Image: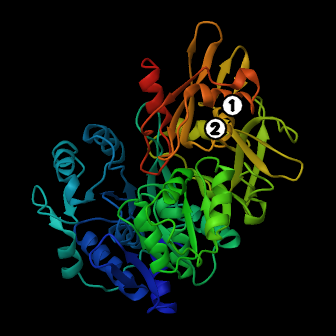
Amino acid sequence: MYIGDVLGRRALYSPEALAVVDSGKTPHLKLTYRELNARANRLANWLRAQGISKGAVVGILARDGVEYLDTFFACGKLGAILALYNWRAHPRELLGVFENTQPQALIFSGEFGEAARFLKQNCASLYHLLHIEGGGVLGSTHLDHALNNAPDSPVHTDSVEAEDIACLIFTGGTTGLPKAAQISHRMIAWNTLNTIIHDLQHGDITVNVFPMFHTGGLLVYTTPLLILGGTVVLTRQFDAAQVLDLIQQYAATVFAGVPTMYQLLTAAPNWASADLSTLRFCTSGGAPLPVTLVEQFEREKGVRFKQGFGMTEFGPGIFALAPEDAIRKAGSIGRPNFFIDARIVDENNQPLPAGEVGELVLKGQSALSGYFNNPEASAAAVDAEGWFHTGDLARHDEAWYFYIVDRKKDMFISGGENVYPAEIEQALYKHPAVQQCAVIGVPDPKWGEVGKACVVLKADQTATPDELIAHLSNHLARYKVPKSVEIMPSLPISAAGKILKRELRALFVPDS
């Protein structure tokens, strides 16, 4: 299977089924599989006429919308590579990424017109621009013009193989340029198989709240569900009240988010009135989900949680925790998905027994094909036995349930003891006043490093730093308790809804 076949098959098997709802359009744009396939064919034919062929890179810099799917499947039909650029990056940061990936065409939202202008003027490979809305820049073509003036005759590239690259998704590196994970057609197919085995059914409907340039937006449920023939409701950007309305309006059966998003849903003005009864389950990943949230969703909405773990470079679906285990195995990411092998190893790559903390390593058919134009990083990610090294510290119990202890880079050492911020954050979430929190290590002349907790309080609750430290002292060993607590109005959040600890470190440890 390759991505270029997907919509053509769906247009054959279920042509009138509802494929996509783009809620960012007014009114909502609703497309059947026949219509979505015709759009992809038109765009593929237009791109081909501009000289785009197998192996060429086509970029997109846009807010979420059906245009991502148009481009993804059009590139799939041509055997071209879709590069999903992060619109939150500064244009000068993007230029370095462009110079590495050499896109020949760029599709962009109107609000990123000035960035597109700068990139076109400074990136020699970029010769064609398509704008989604607005007036465009530097003679760019409106995407609707391409869709309205190209034929919808089928496009197929026979030479595309399973190992060919379908798209590039960029990892959030803390130093240097973001690495471009090469996502092959093979990787997408195996992730889809894992996802269907563990999560999806025919007739499922989801509301996507992740940015489409992120693996969560394109590959967690969106692509597998389109392959399966379900319905994907797209949002332009995450808005808690709108998401609750969309779940109800379109009778969503599955939903995925990160803990920050679930916290914001419970604080939305329409939370009390929202009917979420169509949801078979919600999936949470990206960070440990506070048990209090699991309990609140089940108590107030009758919604059960699946928890999991994924990453851009592998899957992204790697682990799944069944709803019935959400409380019993609280904090676990579950067991490996069906076609994933996982183990915990020490610094010498030797497997560790149950209960011991080491690095999580993975093996399976849903692994990336290295990093684009970065052989050094590609070689470093996989060891001699073919195990992919995640950089996550984890353990598993005797029943093969895995637990992420923390990221290697987030762990700090205080007085010779390893301290894992994720454990402290879970304890903080047990306090009724805590809405969001993040713990970082900061320099200390006596202990080397100590913890600093950054906390956002719930709107109707109060707590002092001393009260929160006392709370933690009742739950954690003394050396784990942060020496300071900073009450903040908000925490820096990524487009994927994750707390950006590197920005907190920059704020409180300027030289880090």
Q: Position of residue 394 (x, y in %)?
A: 73, 40
162 relative to 385, above or below: below
**Apparent side of residue 99 relative to residue 129 in the rendered image (left or right):** right
On the question of residue 456 being in view, the answer is yes
Label 1 with label 2: CB-CB less than 8 Å: yes
Q: What residue is shown with label 2?
A: 428
In the rendering, which numbered label is found on residue 293?
Answer: none
Residue type at the position of mark 2: Leu
Mark 2 surroundings: few (<14), some (14-19) or many (≥20) residues within 10 A: many
Q: Tell me which residue sits at (75%, 50%) in the image.
A: 342
369 relative to 18, above or below: above
In the rendering, which numbered label is found on residue 472?
Answer: 1
Residue type at the position of mark 1: Leu
Q: Tell me which residue sits at (58%, 49%) in the image.
A: 286
Q: Position of residue 12 (x, y in %)?
A: 48, 91
**Apparent side of residue 185 relative to residue 84 in the rendered image (left or right):** right
Please identify the residue farthest to the top as the structure is shown.
445
C-alpha distance separating marks 1 and 2? 7 Å
As rendered, which of 407 and 435 lies closer to the eye? Answer: 435
